Amino acid sequence: MADRGDVLTARRTFGFGRGDSLEHFIVLQSASFPGISDTVVVAPIRKPLPALAAWVGNVPIALGSGATAKPMVIVVPLLAAATTDRFEPEVAGRADPRTMAAIDRVLRALLALR
């Protein structure tokens, strides 16, 4: 079961758009239901491209550690729900509490939660 805040890598293609597959994504929420596979709500992690810079809802994250860390962005507005058997995820890391708090602020604004 993937937990909230886990950074996952897909072993099977799992897309957020036409012909779009991703290498890393973050678990925003997870749940288990009797009789079906674990379900997760995830957001893609992408390179910080100029076209994404203007999007409200991007949260910066560094994948890796130290000198090998790569700056990336979590594109929260592209969240999606799926069962984990669909993409066979592997845990690649974990987001820190500050990153998760930033994601929560974006989710509240996107979903108009109070």
Image: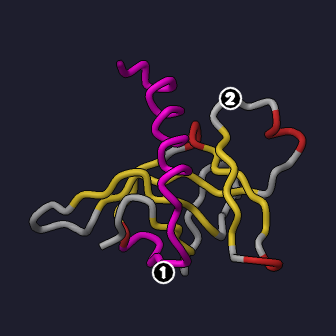
Q: Earlier in the sequence, mark 1 or mark 2?
A: 2
Residue 45: x and y in percent read 65, 57
Q: Could you tell me which secondary element the residue under label 2 belongs to? A: loop
**Residue 78 shown left or right of residue 54 in the figure:** left
Residue type, numbered disc 1: Glu
The question of residue 89 being in magenta is answered with: yes
Residue under label 1, please give it. Answer: 90
Quarter of the image with the N terminus in it: bottom left
Q: Residues within 10 Å of mark 1 (few under 14, many from 20)?
A: some
Q: Which residue corresponds to the image point at 24% horizontal and 58% vertical from the top-left?
A: 31
Judging from the image, what secondary structure is the residue with disc 1 in?
A: strand
Residue type pointed to by label 2? Val
Identity of the residue drawn at 19% across and 66% down: 36
Distance CA(mark 1)–CA(mark 2) = 28 Å
Q: In the orientation shown, which residue stands out farthest toward the left?
A: 34
Q: Magenta stretch: give its range.
A: 85-114
Identify which residue is drawn at 79% across, 68% down. Answer: 70
What crowding class fits label 2: few (fewer than 14 Cα within 10 Å), some (14-19), or many (20 or more)? few
Q: Position of residue 41 (x, y in %)?
A: 40, 52
Q: Quadrant of residue 47?
A: bottom right
Q: Is residue 4 magenta?
A: no
The residue that mark 2 highlights is 56
Question: What percent of the width, then of the height, locates residue 79?
Answer: 51, 44
